[in-house]
Image: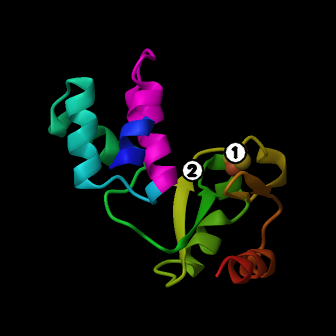
């Protein structure tokens, strides 16, 4: 709780502090717990429903912990045209990697593309994606 209060205090004076707080809480704990939602709502004078609404709207935030590695796979048009849907289908319900859809990583000419953490992976095919998943798992 002390770390949570530090995160909230670090952003409390900012304009629009909710998203930065949620990003830091997600990064610190791997999810935004009900306890965190309650504390954030109280600190920002928001309702828990308002905070829940933001947590559930953005793919970056998770209400429950998930130990799987996150692979953000571009699902926008250029990557779709290069076969990303078949790649994504191959990872559906993967036990150790969670695939999150993102919409354009800015590398449209070299897709299909993905991002793990802050690292971009371009020109993916089944073999390259398989190797990337193996490295994550
Ligand atoms: S459409 Fe996939 S990187 Fe732009």
Q: Is residue 70 left or right of residue 8?
A: right
Residue 127's label in the rendered image is: none
In the image, residue 136 sits, relative to residue 47, either above or below, namely below
Magenta span: predominant SS is helix
- Whether residue 72 is in magenta: the answer is no
1 on left or right of 22: left
Tell how many labels. 2
Left or right placement of residue 72 versus residue 107 in this view: left
Separation of marks 2 and 1 at Cα, in angstroms: 8 Å
Q: Which residue is mark 2?
A: 102
Residue sticking out furthest to the front: 2
Query: Which residue shows up at 68% across the image and 65% down it?
Result: 83
Q: Quadrant of residue 55?
A: top left
Quarter of the view holding residue 124? bottom right
Task: Label 2, secondary structure: give it.
Answer: strand
Picture coordinates of residue 20, whole percent (x, y):
47, 33
Label 1 within 8 A of ligand 1 by Cβ? yes
Q: From the viewer's perspective, is residue 14 above or below residue 66?
A: above
Q: Position of residue 123 (x, y in %)?
A: 83, 62
Under tag 1, what secondary structure?
A: loop
Residue beneath label 1, please? 105
Q: Residue at x 60, y 58 (%)?
A: 72
Color style of the picture:
rainbow
Horizontal relation, residue 72 to residue 23: left or right: right
Q: Where does the magenta region start and end?
A: 8-28
């Amino acid at each position: 709780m002390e770390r949570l209060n530090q995160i909230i205090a670090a952003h409390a004076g900012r304009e629009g502090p909710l998203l930065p707080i949620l990003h830091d809480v997600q990064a610190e704990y791997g999810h935004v717990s009900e306890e965190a939602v309650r504390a954030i709502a109280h600190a920002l004078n928001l309702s828990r429903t308002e905070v829940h609404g933001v947590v559930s709207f953005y793919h970056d935030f998770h209400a429950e912990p998930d130990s799987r590695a996150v692979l953000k796979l571009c699902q926008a048009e250029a990557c779709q045209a290069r076969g990303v849907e078949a790649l994504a289908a191959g990872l559906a319900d993967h036990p150790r990697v969670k695939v999150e859809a993102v919409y354009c990583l800015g590398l449209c000419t070299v897709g299909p593309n993905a991002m793990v953490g802050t690292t971009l992976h371009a020109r993916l095919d089944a073999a390259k994606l398989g190797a990337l998943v193996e490295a994550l798992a």
